[in-house]
Image (cartoon, rainbow, N blue to C red):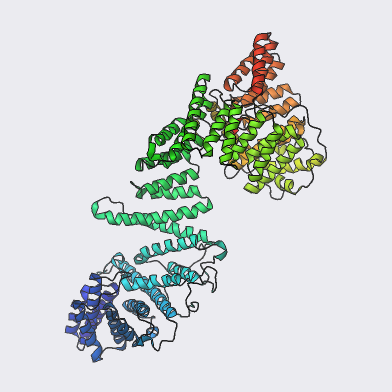
Amino acid sequence: MTARKSGSRLETEIERSRSEGQWDKIPELVRQLSAKLISNDDLGNLLLGEAKLQQYLKENPIKQGASPRGPRPQLVEVRKHLTAALDRGNLKPDYMQEASMLMAKLSYVEGDYSEAFNQYGKVTLDELALVGAPVYRLSMIAEAYATKGLCLEKVPAASPSLSNYNVDKDQEVITCYEKSGDIALLYLQEVEKALSARLQNHSPKPGPVAQEQELGYFLETGLQRAHVIHFKNGNLTQGVGRFREILRAVETRTTQNLRMTIAKQLAEILLRGMCEQSYWSSLEDPPSKSHLDDPLLRQGAPYLKDYALSRRPRVYSGENLFCPQENTEEALLLLLISESMANRDAVLSRIPEHNSDRIISLQSASVVYDLLTIALGRRGQYEMLSECLERAMKFAFEEFHLWYQLALSLMAAGTSARAVKVLKECIRLKPDDPTIPLLAVKLCIGALHWLEEGECFAKMVVDMGEKASEFRAKGYLAIGLVYSLKATDASLRGMQEEYQKKALGAFQRAQSLSPTDHLAAFYLALELAVSRQIPEALGYVRQALQLQGDDVHSLHLLALLLSAQKHYHDALNIIEMALSEYPENFILLFTKVKLETLCQGPEEALLTCKHMLQIWKSCYNLTNPSDSGRGSSLLDRAIADRRTLNAMTLPDFSDPETGSLWHWLLLAIGVFRSLSHRPLPTPSSTPPQPKADLPLHPPKPAGGYHAFCDHSLQRQSNNSNAPLHHPPPCSVHATSMAASRVEQALSEVASSMQSSAPKQGPLHPWMTLAQIWLHAAEVYIGMGKPPEATACTQEAANLFPMSHNVLFTRGQVAELRGNVDEAKRWYEEALSISPTHVKTMQRLGLILHQLQRYSLAEKILRDAVQVNSTAHDVWNSLGEVLQAQGHGGAATECFLTALELEASSPILPFTIIPRQL
């Protein structure tokens, strides 16, 4: 009885050692078994042969893709043990099967594939029981299927070993590997389950931890080879299906690295090899036919999975589990999981001993982040991408690629200030690359308006000399843009002229270095136009169009130059030609509204405004969250309404809900519905009032976009109804930018106090929509229709209630109604938000002139001239005030200046064209 209990204990210990791969303990356990029990020599030979074979493979691992080396002296003793165990035939049937599988494995290791295959013929692998089998036997069966698959691949089809093999070879090979992979996953799950149970029971001999356990060549082959053959045969659907099966299995610590590798490979296939139409759910079986599969690579009949294991690995299941619905979603899920694993297992130590591990860890993480860039970039989720790349900064010490990816993602996400800081680090890591400082210049002269920093970055490119090669011209172009913007911001006339001269010199230098670059000729023409050298500007803009005939900004500049020469019909033709190529360009459409008002009458201008509403709806497709159940929105009604605007007018609005931010959609229903009740009058002799001056490039202290107009429209109107220009104003932009930030904050506060839901998403679409409404209001003001102008202004006010542009337009409407006191109040409120808004200053000056407050009117108009010395309507108003005060000489000089400036003033200021790289 004691011997039986001792033998049972030894057998349990042997079984556990075999399951956990503790082969160094087997010889001692075999000696104990032989001493306590009789007739165990055959079992001892089996165990010793297995232990020595496994120890040999541990010390001399077979690498993936390599062939076994042939017979080795160390394996002679292994064959001796296994032969002795098999020849006597005293083993139990289960042990005989194990001995045969080990002999086949030994033959494969020695390179005798036919012998190995014949050995498997003695063991019917499909009949081996999985239910109730010891854990170690699961590993042996999995390795046996993998080894059989390897033999099938290596043994020629004409070999006698395969003479009676009727099944398609590839089908059988894939089936062997898939069975091996499934049983291997089951084995690893059972090992981890046993280890966890033993640790919970505080076993005195817990054995090795699972992290020390390695898959080994055969188990790894079984897990990885099936999908490789599927892809090699052009069967992408089955390969993806196999990936999913492995990933759905309950994870073990041993398979974590394998799962991360498979997740990355599957994500790459989903992103690069599969479209949304060919995607199928991860819970469904792969389709039998798919256009993803390559018929040229497919060999034999399509693979059909026709086997069923009596015991399969556990898979994740439960309620409310997330299931991706399309390929990008699944790829993103896989990559986020891989990123989490890469960050968890990161090797950050810089000591030499860990250098190779750190490089492997970095390369693995870089692949994940590159694929994340593809996946998130497709969806425009740059903010999320930048957050992911920020987590990668733990890998990024002296690693240019990750820093550069982060900088680009921050640029795309609109986080320009942070992007510039990251680009500085990229410049430090790669100082000879001219493209990096050029990117920094692009940000500095764009949204940030950091002109000093932009000049430093541009000089870095120029100072590289010949190293910058073709980018040197871009460096001079960047310096020219910086000087041009500095001229716009300068407070003194002398400084303006100096910066303009430097800008022209830089643009000329850029053109000499790159005579085929249309941008150099274009910006040279733009700077000459700003300096009111119209004939010279026309020459250079024609040169730019010869180099790039479809450049939208060159066409726009040509139209503005023609309008400055009072060729309005020619300018309108140019705009219409440009719109045929760029039909959704709002800045061209705004210019078209101005020109149509002068050339074709306000009715055509209103039709263009309606067209802009339709384009806005199709471009942004934004919905009104508070409009459910209350009727159609304005834009839907505008698109559906086929009536001409000649038979429509706008009503006055006294609805108490007009203060609601989102009520503009409901208000607009009445706008277009009531257009059918009142005919439009003939064009008024008084030209339409202009829109507000909206600075394009605010200076560094303000650090942000204007709160009202988008990047390309912010200088939309620094002019009066007749064209006026905006080259050298005084230091207006710092104040204007600060004012715009104040008005944005006030608008947000005012909107938050209203009853409807706030605007959602970025501000750019809503700023564009507000511009459209203000242009429509401007047209109605020119037609002398205050009710309609009030309605359009209210639409813009619902979006940005504290915008100085909206307040200025309210003042114009009040003037049109003859309510001077109300107009004065609106203008004063606008100036309280933007103290240097030239149009408001000019209109307020005229009102003060009407009220005979000449000194204050003169003071305000002189300030306006100081802000923008080329505003001819301001000079004219100042002349009227001086004349009323009896200063005839000074008034005459003002009138002459106004006439001279008006002769070269475009329909809209030249500076509405963005100056950017």
In this rendering, position of residue 443 left or right of residue 344: right
Quarter-of-image position of residue 326 = bottom right
Q: Residue placed at 35% from the left, 54% from the top?
A: 362
Quarter-of-image position of residue 453 = top left
In the image, 24 versus 841, the foreground residue is 841
In this rendering, position of residue 361 left or right of residue 819: left
Vertical relation: 262 (above or below) 850: below
Vertical relation: 836 (above or below) 114: above
In this rendering, position of residue 751 left or right of residue 393: right
Q: Residue placed at 51% from the left, 59% from the top?
A: 329
Vertical relation: 474 (above or below) 176: above
Q: Residue placed at 61% from the left, 15% from the top?
A: 859
Quarter-of-image position of residue 158 = bottom left
The percent position of residue 503, horizontal first and vertical second, equals 49, 28
**Quarter of the N terminus within the rendering:** bottom left
The percent position of residue 183, horizontal first and vertical second, equals 38, 75
Q: Is residue 312 visible?
A: yes
The percent position of residue 627, horizontal first and vertical second, equals 68, 47
In the image, 721 versus 734, the foreground residue is 721
The percent position of residue 196, horizontal first and vertical second, equals 33, 68
Vertical relation: 228 (above or below) 642: below
Q: How many marks?
A: 0
In this rendering, position of residue 396 left or right of residue 774: left
Q: Is residue 755 visible?
A: no
In the image, 480 versus 808, the foreground residue is 480
